[in-house]
Image: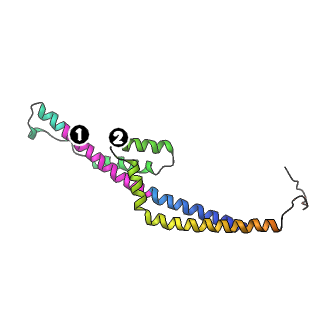
Amino acid sequence: MCENLIANEWDLMQHRRMRDRVIANKLADLVERAAFEALKQAHEDKLDAELQAWVDAGNEESAWEETPFNHNDARMDATDLARGAKSTDREKLAAVETELENLGVDMVALMAAAHEDARIAILRFEGDIRDLEKRRREIKGDFDALKKAAPIDLARDEFEDAEIVE
């Protein structure tokens, strides 16, 4: 019976971890896409401001050379933010959220979208978790009933080379 209880607890923990991992992976995907787009937009905004300053300085618009957008650097930065979003370290998560806010990305909105995107998988895991929790209560009830019916009195049992420590 104890083995059943332990196996059930293990399954329960694994299902919770799988559910959480599905959500974390969805969130990381959304963070990466949103961060990349925000970095791209920030670059475009910077170019617009530089062009306006160039023209305001009396230069011709056709003579201005824009700085190309570095897709690789933006992708690496977005990937780093996505990795940080999967972290369990509170400080790292706070840093990611701050950086996303600086880019104009709402982390809470991304979290809500991640939950919505993973809704079907979450529902399946939640159902399994409910079943496992019900099974745990049943096993625990059976175990408690067994202990009540046949209590173990360690003081009566004799063990060689053993003592009871209180």
User: Mark 2 belongs to which amino acid?
Assistant: Asn
Residue 9, horizontal then vertical, whole percent: 64, 63
**Would you name the residue on which mark 2 appears?**
102
Find numbered disc 2 in the image and state the secondary structure of the residue it sits on.
helix
Vertical side of 72 occupied by 159: above or below: below
Residue 104, horizontal then vertical, whole percent: 32, 44
Residue 108 horizontal side relative to residue 133, left or right: left
Residue 30, horizontal then vertical, whole percent: 37, 55
Residue 73, horizontal then vertical, whole percent: 32, 46
Which-is-in-front pick, marks 1 and 2?
A: 2
> In the image shown, does 127 or 42 lie closer to the viewer?
127
Question: Can you tell which quarter of the image residue 57 is in?
Answer: top left
Q: Which residues are magenta?
A: 25-49
Q: Which of the marked residues, 1 or 2, is nearer the chain's N terminus? A: 1
Crowd rating for badge 1 (residues with CA inside 10 Å; few <14, some 14–19, many 20+): some
> In the image shown, does 144 or 12 lie closer to the viewer?
144
Q: Where is the N terminus found, in terms of image quarters?
A: bottom right
**Would you name the residue on which mark 1 appears?**
46
Residue at image position (46%, 45%) is 93
Q: How is the image coloured?
A: rainbow
User: Mark 1 belongs to which amino acid?
Assistant: Lys
> In the image shown, does 146 or 97 lie closer to the viewer?
146
Residue at image position (43%, 50%) is 83
Magenta span has 47? Answer: yes
